[in-house]
Image (cartoon, rainbow, N blue to C red):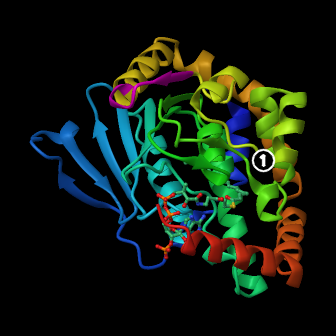
Amino acid sequence: MALASGVRFAERALLRPWALLRGTTLGRTEPAAGGGGDGARRFGSQRVLVEPDAASGVAVMKLRNPPVNALSLELLTELVISLEKLENDKTFRGVILTSDCPRVFCAGLDLTEICGRNPAHCAEYWKAMQELWLRTYLSSLVLVAAINGACPAGGCIIALSCDCRVLADNPKYRIGLNETLLGIIAPFWLKDTYVNTIGHRASEQALQLGSLFPPAEALQVGLVDQVVPEDQVQSTALSEMARWLAVPDHARQLTKNMMRKATADRLLRQRDADTQNFVSFVCRDSIQKSLQAYLEKLRQRKG
Ligand SMILES: CCCCCCCCCCCCC/C=C/C(=O)SCCNC(=O)CCNC(=O)[C@H](O)C(C)(C)COP(=O)(O)OP(=O)(O)OC[C@H]1O[C@@H](n2cnc3c(N)ncnc32)[C@H](O)[C@@H]1OP(=O)(O)O
């Protein structure tokens, strides 16, 4: 079949995630609350809850790594595996990605994974980050982010890797790439994703300033597609999903691939170098000090 040979090429180049899996409980299946048939059964892992609806071909994937859905190595691995499972099941055409943690969609990279860790651990962690981005960015499924909480840095990238973003209208739910404020730098593939979404000039400003946009500004700059009252985020995400699923899969998938492949290929061509850059950068004493200070500030700041 002609379908997305480029997507398949990219998928073949991706790591197998199983080796990363440590102490997770993937594959567990349990009846959804009030559910009966197969279409109502949910599955998932400790940190990712998947509620599949076979009738509509849409699954809701909830991040549940309290308190703030920081992207730990385990969460990254479980996300990759859950996504792969849905992609391999031809019943499913779309996924709504949302948070099971109150007030936070995803706090981004788990700073405890790169603070005071050895280079080998940082490298393993970064490879898992690359893997998740590649898989989501090139996913053949329609991905809609239902952003029901704060969405900084890596959380923003999760959202930007989706095809469409719906943000709850709450001034505390800010979204953007604030890396520079932590003294770190967004890698080129993250920058490319930003530019592809909001354009060069807006990215140049927002990346340097580490801007986190409140909902109205996020909508204005094009970081999100809709801002709706908090209690309408899920229903709006479902409506958006219906709009995207009204398009024939093969045409939509090939078009998505055409729009995104060059960006993903840039990372695929230099994954090892990107990992080495990341590791040598975050393992510098000065960067470790800034990250420690930021983490300490977060721990002291309550509310
Ligand atoms: C499926 C598709 C996926 C695609 C994915 C691709 C991924 C590719 C990613 C590539 C990313 C590369 C670059 C990324 C860089 C980063 O992400 S750096 C991290 C930046 N994050 C932040 O700056 C957010 C920091 N946190 C906050 O601002 C707030 O915590 C919050 C999110 C706004 C929530 O506030 P609140 O509800 O008030 O909670 P707090 O009290 O602040 O925090 C609770 C505890 O959680 C700890 N914590 C918070 N954030 C982090 C974190 N990022 N890492 C580790 N720990 C964190 C915080 O210290 C508190 O801890 P305790 O005091 O011990 O309870």
Is 83 or 193 nearer to us in this picture?
Answer: 193
The image position of residue 18, as x and y in percent, is 53, 68
Badge 1: how crowded within 10 Å, few (<14), some, or many (20+)? many
**Dividing the image into 4 quarters, which one contains the N terminus?**
top right
Is residue 120 among what the camera can see? yes
The image position of residue 183, as x and y in percent, is 83, 64
- Seen at 37% across and 51% down, the residue is 102
Does the magenta segment cover residue 171?
no
Is residue 19 among what the camera can see? no
Q: Which residues fall within the magenta stretch? A: 226-232
Check mark 1 vs ligand 1: CB closer than 8 Å? yes or no. Answer: yes
Q: How many marks?
A: 1
Residue 146 relative to residue 57: left or right: right
Q: Is residue 215 above or below residue 116?
A: above
Is 66 or 26 nearer to us in this picture?
Answer: 66
Q: Quadrant of residue 86?
A: top left
Residue 282 relative to residue 241: left or right: right
Is 253 or 150 nearer to us in this picture?
Answer: 150
- The residue singled out by tag 1 in the image is 190
Q: Callout 1, which amino acid? A: Leu
